[in-house]
Image (cartoon, helix red, strand yellow):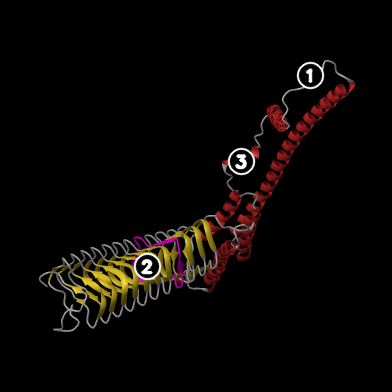
Amino acid sequence: MSPQIPAREAERRGLRLWNVGIVLLLAFAGALLVAGFVFWTGWDLLGARELKKQQKIDSKTLFDLVKLSFGVVAGAGALVALVVAYRRQRVDEDAALRDTTRLHNERFTNAVSQLGSEAPTVRLGGVHALAGLADDAPTRQLRQTCIDVLCAFIRLPYTAESALAAGAEARHSYLALREARHTVIRLVRDHLRLPQEHPHSWQGHDFDFTNAVFDGGDLSQATFSGGAVTFTGATFLGGAVTFVDVTFSGGEVFFLDATFSGGEVEFRGATFSGGEVYFAGATFSGGEVYFTGATFSGGEVYFTGATFSGGEVAFLDATISGGRVEFSYATLSGGKVDITGATISGGEVAFTRTKCLSGTVDFTGSRISGGTVDFTRAAFSGGIVDFDSAAFSGGMVNFPRATFSAGIVDFSEATFAGSMVDFTEATFSHGTVYYVRSMFSGGTVDYTDATFSGGPVDYTDATFSGGTVNFSGATGSAPVGLLTAAGSPLPAGVTLAAGW
């Protein structure tokens, strides 16, 4: 197997030089233009108006003309020598590149042969040989080729430990192959930790793990500032794939249509100041994805169209001051999206048109002082959205045109000193919205044009010292539990629709 050489590299190897006569002609023309420019500039600076005419040439003038002639000839010779030397240098450089590339190809072939060996030690040696070869590659494209082969090794069919046949031999073979695979991931991590200007840094390159099977791997503290890392269609069965303390300042990481049936993918302490991470279409039937303590000042994380039937996606204590975290069109039939203790001061967390059949979206104890949490047109036929003890001092939480046929939205003991919570045109046929013991000193909760045919909105023991809860234009029966206690008057700040 030999590396593929792109057209531009093949063209460079051909060293398509111009004809020497054309080059010399252009060089002389350029020299004359420069000399003429210098002469006329000097003439103008000296303020000369005309040349002094001389009827007879004396010996001094003749000698000056001879010196000028020799100078012109010498200059022309130097120019020819310069052009020839430049062409020779180009030819030598190209020859050196060909020799280096030939040696690279020989080492490449040997390393790939080692990688394909059945002997565990030889195979592991092939992994390190390819990584070293990538570091020494004479061109960026040849380095990418080495990286592609290492990634292809991870994509080869692989049986995880849970599916092993009984027997010590099978387990030993599995452990040997697993060690080689984890070594590849570790080498990728080590090279992505190097600063981009380092000659052995792999930042900006592409890493393709499409449809691979993972039972662990460590990419912690890597920096993704360009290129694409692809886990599309990958299966995570067990172990931990860690992105702890990684930095995303550019580039893209794809988990499109990935399957999480066990193990963990951990982005704890990650920093997102740019770039994108895509979990669109992923299936979570087990396992966990953690963004605990992550910081989002930019960049985007997408769970668009993902399916949650188990497992957990957690943003515990995350800080979102910019960027976007999106669960639009996702389906929750189990599992949990946990945003407990998060600080949202900007950016957006979006659950637009999400289907909540069961499971939990948990904002318990979160602090929302800016940005948007958006459940526009979400459908709740089960499950819980929990803002228990959350603090709202700015920003928006949107449920416009959401549908509640079951399930719970819980703002119990939440504090509203600002913010807008918007249920405009929402439909409540069942389910419950709780504000038990919540405190309103500012902000607005808006049910304008909402429809109630069942299910309570419960403000039991809520405290209103400011702010507004608006039911203007709402239709249907007055929601059960609207009063702070049975038979007591409406709390200040609650505005009912006419006829309620």
Instruction: Tell me the amino acid under the disc marked 1.
Output: Lys
CB-based contact (under 8 Å), mark 2 and mark 1: no
Residue shown at 15%/83% (left/top)? 488
The mark found on residue 370 in the picture is 2
Q: Is residue 228 left or right of residue 327?
A: right
Where is residue 146 shown, x and y percent of the image?
59, 54
Quarter of the rendering occupied by the C terminus: bottom left
Q: Secondary structure at mark 3?
A: helix
Of pointers 3 and 2, the one earlier in the residue sequence? 3
Rate crowding at label 1 as few (under 14), some (14 to 19) or many (20 or more) other CA atoms within 10 Å.
few
Rate crowding at label 2 as few (under 14), some (14 to 19) or many (20 or more) other CA atoms within 10 Å.
many
Residue 408 visible in the snapshot: yes
First to last magenta residue range: 291-311
Instruction: Tell me the amino acid under the disc marked 2.
Output: Gly
Question: Residue 304 in magenta?
Answer: yes
Where is residue 183 shown, x and y percent of the image?
58, 65
Q: Is residue 166 left or right of residue 414?
A: right
Instruction: Tell me the amino acid under the disc marked 3.
Output: Ala
How far is mark 3 from mark 2, CA to CA?
54 Å
| Residue 436 vertical position relative to residue 70 in the rendered view, above or below | below
The mark found on residue 251 in the picture is none
Where is residue 291 shown, x and y percent of the image?
44, 70
Q: Which residue is mark 3?
A: 10
Residue shown at 10%/71% (left/top)? 499
| Residue 110 vertical position relative to residue 457 in the rendered view, above or below | above
Rate crowding at label 3 as few (under 14), some (14 to 19) or many (20 or more) other CA atoms within 10 Å.
few
Q: Which residue is mark 1?
A: 53
Q: Quick one: 167 or 11, which is closer to the camera?
A: 11
